[in-house]
Each structure stands twice: as structure tokens, then as C-alpha cells.
Amino acid sequence: MNAFSRRGACPALSAPMQTGDGRLVRLNPVAGGVSPKSLLGLGESALRHGNGIMEVTARGSLQIRGLTPASARLLAVEVDAMGIAASTGVPVETGPLAGLDPEEIADPRPLAERIRAAIEDAGLAQRLGPKVSVIVDGGGRLTMDAVSADVRLAAMRIDAGVQWLVAVAGDRQNATPLVMVEEDAARDIAVAILRMVAEKGREAHARDLSERQLTSPASWHSFAPAKDRLPLTAAPAPSPIGLFPLGGDATALGIGLPFGSMPAQKLIELTQRAFTLGATEIRLAPGRALVFIGLSPTACRSLQQTAATLGFLTDAADPRTRIAACPGAPACASGRIATRDIAETIAAENRDILDSSLTLHISGCAKGCAHPGPAALTLVGGENGAGLVVDGTAKALPAGYRPGYDAARGIGRIAAAIREARLRGDTTAACLTRLGAAGVAELYRQE
Ligand code: SF4
């Protein structure tokens, strides 16, 4: 087993990852987007070689599932023939409206490109683990605040100019800020941090660096520490779903995939319509969405209608955007519960409690593919049916069980108690805290 095929590695095209439903290929276009023609080609390849399901992840990567070793090789050949430049080294990610949003502080793409080149020159790609990443966030309406990275550079307006806030290990809210510097220094510091991570080995991340390592290098000694100048607070993650005027007649349209996946055939139909309407590029967006570029406002509205008819998400307030659910049974061979059916029922019956304070994760098994981190409520499939984990991950021991077919009713009991306990202005998370973990588990178990 080589370093790229081990469990937990990012499944780049050349190294598909074994999952519960065959091999999985994850594709990150270097430019952050693809042409409509390329997306059509990818959809057709997914139909030919995979299980016909395409996904966009919470991080904004495209995934094709259900491949065999042989079909994954064929897919890689076809992607290559389509001329899609897929990122194979350290991902250096920018936001889905990078370079287009009149509200962004700086176009992050030139700096991202310079960092990619410096990583290449330094030979770091082979020495870093497959999950080490860099974010270059130019600000604007669709920031990368909610996406974690080892190194994050965020554009800041300081006095009359732009500086880059360098932070490590986390999302916008919990990353550790280091310094605020000009573009050249930002690139040098980002690469210096990656070099230190590489020296610690292929399993290392920026979070493994010591405070001394992060503060001592001479290259950024002379700069003022960022934390003395700026609090690293973040607004709630912006939804990529909806219309984003770009100035003049140009408008970007964000369309979501329910629970991050759609049959390839529907994606093909949507892309064909977008192409007919004049879309020039389709970008992958964190938050499991696609952003269509090059459309007029009228064309956007027309594509929105098509998307809604096909079952895509066109409303940022759609309750399905609040639930993370993996393919589960029967799509995934490891799935013990019908995650998507349960999620659809919960979303349809409990719209009022699915506010942005709640993380609800429905996982077919303890692997927790759709949401590796902790969630306020996790339903997880196992031998005993659908277990409920309160404030934990899918790997934790559930506090109570119901039969899988009846799991949505258990969440319904919790939702009813939240409605009763809710005080004016209360969030769902606040109500859950008041009910307590033991109380929530008891509600779930109740007949
Ligand atoms: S978490 Fe879901 S997608 Fe992942 S292996 Fe388990 S059932 Fe399959």
C-alpha cells in the first residue's frame, strides 16, 4: 500500500480511495472551475464508469463514486483527454467568486498561483501529506471562512492598501493568526510554514507545529503579530446558493446539490441548459454547490427554474442545506440506514427547528464520511439500527437507538420538545443545551 492509497488519504484522480461503495475519485480543478463542456464530459464519464452519482463536498471538491480499479483508470484517461487541469499537489484554494466579485478586497488568484509555483519549486508536494492545504481568501460575498486549512491568507483592507493576514491550522474562526504582511511576504511565510510541516513528516499538519516554530523564524520576525492588531472573528458562513450580481449585466448563480449529491444525468441536464443559456464557467463552491458564471440575470432565473424542477437547491433557506447526510443505504454497501430518505423526512417535517445554529449529521455507518467533525445531533447506522450521538461524531458510542426506518420519528420527538422549550429569540442549539444530552437521548428513545 503506498502513501496515497492508505485510508484517509485524499483520493486524487491517480489514486482513487476505497470506500464502502467502490472507489472514489475526488477532483479539484486548479482554476476552481470547469467549462460547461468539461462538466458535461465528467457527467458522462461518471455515468459510464461510476455508479451514476456525482457529489460536491462541503469543501467544494467534485467526487465520482462507485468506481472499480479498472473503471477509475479509464475515468482518469478521459479527464486527461478533456484537458481539465486537476490539482494533484497541495491544494491552494480560492473562493468561488475569486476575481469576479466587485466586493472582494483583492483578487486572490495571482497570490495563489505564486504559492503553487513556490511549492513546486521547493519540491514540497511530495513531502506533504495529502490533506495539507492552503487557502487564499480575497474576501467579498463568498469567503472561505468556514473551510479549514493548514495555512490561510485572508486579504484585509489596511489604511489605503491591502495586506494579507496569515493564520494557521483552522477555519477563519479558530485558526491561529500570526502576522499581517504584504503579498510577497505572505507567499514566503506560507511556504516557510509548509516547509516546517514537511520536515515533521507526511502525517504532519500545521497544528503540529510548536508555538516557538510559528513565532521564531526570522522571515516574519519583523512584522507585528496579527493577533495584536485584529480579532479573528468570522461572520456565519455565507451560503453559496442564490444570485450574486457581479456588476453590469453579469450575475453568478449558485445552485446547491441536496446533501451534496445528484444523479449524474440530472447534472448533465442542468449543465446542458446552462450552456444553452450562455454559461461560460462552472465553479465548485464550499457548501456543496455549483456557481454558474457568464449568465445574464434573465438567464440565471431561467436556469434556477430548471434547477428547481430537477431537484437541485435554489433557496439558501432550504432546510436540506442544514443537514449533512452521506449516500448511506442502499447506495453505499457499508450503509446500515437509508440516510437520504431519513434526511428528506426530517427536513420536510421540521423546517422550523433547522436553523443555522444546528448541525445535524446522518451517517450510514460509523465512518462518518459526510461530516467527520462533531455535530450537535448525529444519527448513525449500526447493528442496532439508527443510533443517536449528542455532541459527538459518528464514531462515538450512541446514547440511544431506534430502528432505522423509524429514526426520523425520534428526531421529531426532539423537535417537538425544542418547540415547547423555545423562548423568544432562542436558537435550536440553545434549546438543545437546555434540554441536556441525557434528556435529548431519552426523547429520541421514546415510543
Ligand atoms: S459513512 Fe456513509 S458513505 Fe461513508 S462508508 Fe459509511 S455508509 Fe458509506
Image (cartoon, rainbow, N blue to C red):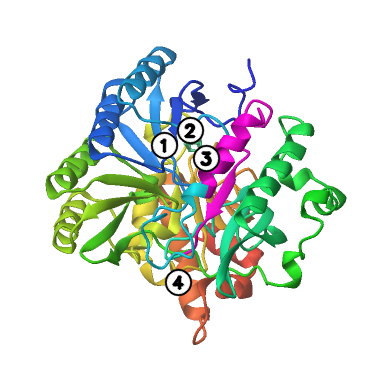
The disc at residue 135 is none
Residue at the disc numbered 3: 369
Classify 10 Å Cα crowding around label 4: few (below 14), some (14-19), many (20 and above): some
Classify 10 Å Cα crowding around label 3: few (below 14), some (14-19), many (20 and above): some
**Could you tell me how far apart the alpha carbons at marks 2 and 3 are, in whole angstroms?**
21 Å
Pick the residue in front: 206 or 278. Answer: 278
Amino acid type for the residue under numbered disc 2? Ser
Residue at the disc numbered 4: 416
Amino acid type for the residue under numbered disc 1? Pro
Give the secondary structure at mark 2.
loop
**Is the CB–ligand 1 distance for label 3 below 8 Å?**
yes
Q: Do the residues labelled 2 and 1 touch (CB within 8 Å)?
A: yes
The disc at residue 29 is 1
- Which is nearer the N-term, disc 2 or disc 4? 2
Mark 3 or 1, closer to the camera: 1
Q: Can residue 60 be seen in this view?
A: yes
- Which is nearer the N-term, disc 2 or disc 1? 1
Q: Is residue 390 visible?
A: no
- Which is nearer the N-term, disc 3 or disc 1? 1
The disc at residue 87 is 2
**Could you tell me how far apart the alpha carbons at marks 2 and 4 are, in whole angstroms?**
46 Å
Amino acid type for the residue under numbered disc 4? Ala
